[in-house]
Image (cartoon, grey):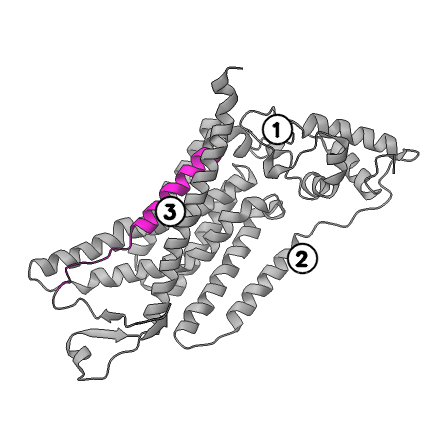
Amino acid sequence: MDVFGYLAPYGLEWLNLLVRWLHIITGIAWIGASFYFVWLDNSIRPPAPGSELAKKGVAGELWAVHGGGFYNPQKYLVAPAELPKELHWFKWEAYSTWLSGFALLVIVYYLNAQAMMVDRGVADLSSWQAVGIGLASLVVGWVVYDLLCRSPLGRHDLAFGAVVYGFLVASAWVLSHLLSGRAAYLHVGAMIGTMMVANVAMLIIPGQRKMVNAMLAGRKPDPAHGIRAKQRSVHNNYFTLPVLFIMISNHYAMTYSHAYSWAVLGAIMLAGVLIRHFFNLRHKGRIEWQYPAAGVALLAAVAVAIAPAPPAGGAAAAGSSPAAQFASVRTIVDQRCVGCHAERPTQPGFATAPAGVMLHTPELLTQNAARIYQQTVQTRAMPLANLTHMTDAERAQIGAWFEAGARTGNN
């Protein structure tokens, strides 16, 4: 192998690290701003009728203290009589989050599609087919959502939310029958993220620009632009908790590897919306505990429903010694797992062992016995996309070894 071929996976690993770090930073900035402004909108109080603020067109104001300073934000009903010289636009937080997220999708998934996106037990796809499905999902997601917003349904918040939720769950079902579990989840998240950033880029910012341009031209701004922008901003706020879960979902194979992974995702997304709704109502002074209670109950129900079955017991083959069991499991792990989980992985696309888990020595194998059992037997999430073709019989052997105490024969 030439030097470039040897260093390319290592370089991609660093690119992954840096872009992921950027994605988290910009995501915090964007979601933090979303949370803040929804809180602000729900917390401001209208000025007294006939007061100077009311005469200036102020719809509400708020006094707050933070970091040793006092703040007095004000919101105008449509726009102030005169534009200030400096006007901050909240847009780059959104754009940077989406751009870094899409770059991460390319680095982690699209450049290694056979390992990260294709599961031949689900659908026998080429890399280009898998990537094409992923990209198409982002476009279709935005088009369907935007059309629903512009339809008469968009004027009825509860019905609209139910239909969009149903569309996202249906999308999860379709993707789970085409892509690997973790890729399906990530693309549902990418669909939501694309809806959110397109709201900013195509509705919120253009509407605000039209209002500013109208004022600069001496015309009264059309309040319809502000109403549409507020609607899309509220949608983005409800999307935040589901998309945050999906961002971390690749660490939790118990969810995306389940036979009904799409339903698991749907339930978790709904729980996130219910919890977010509680906080939005709380900002308005309404404390309605039934919403977070329902969200927590839903999460608890999911945890119970997808819990792995207890060991059957007596799985070890009759007369099989601990040493023989361990030798058999080590052979399986060497053949099926060590290509990735080694000090120097040989599987293309991996510069370091995933999650830092190495299994190339007897000591490391026994040290990670519980994790091996969980990933190969309970969730069946590993080997990744079953690239190395681990059989059901081999999984049963690993299960029997672990349930018998994960012994080496020397202990």
Q: Quadrant of residue 65?
A: bottom left
State which tag comes first along the sequence, 2 or 1. 2
| Nearer to the camera, 108 or 309 | 108
SS at circle 1: loop
Q: Amino acid at mark 3?
A: Thr
Q: Is residue 181 above or below residue 13?
A: below
SS at circle 2: helix
**From the viewer's perspective, is 295 left or right of 48?**
right
SS at circle 3: helix
| Nearer to the camera, 366 or 335 | 366
At horizontal 41% and vertical 42% (from top left) the residue drawn is 101
Q: Is residue 393 above or below residue 54?
A: above
Position of the N terminus, as image quadrant, is top right
Instruction: Determine crowd level at label 2: few under 14, some 14-19, many 20+ residues with C-alpha closer than 10 A.
Output: few
Residue that badge 1 annotates? 387
Residue that badge 3 annotates? 97
Residue that badge 2 annotates? 304
Q: Position of residue 80 (x, y in %)?
A: 16, 68
**Can residue 20 be spotted in the picture?**
yes
At horizontal 48% and vertical 27% (from top left) the residue drawn is 127
Query: Which residues are drawn in magenta?
Result: 83-108
Q: Amino acid at mark 2?
A: Val
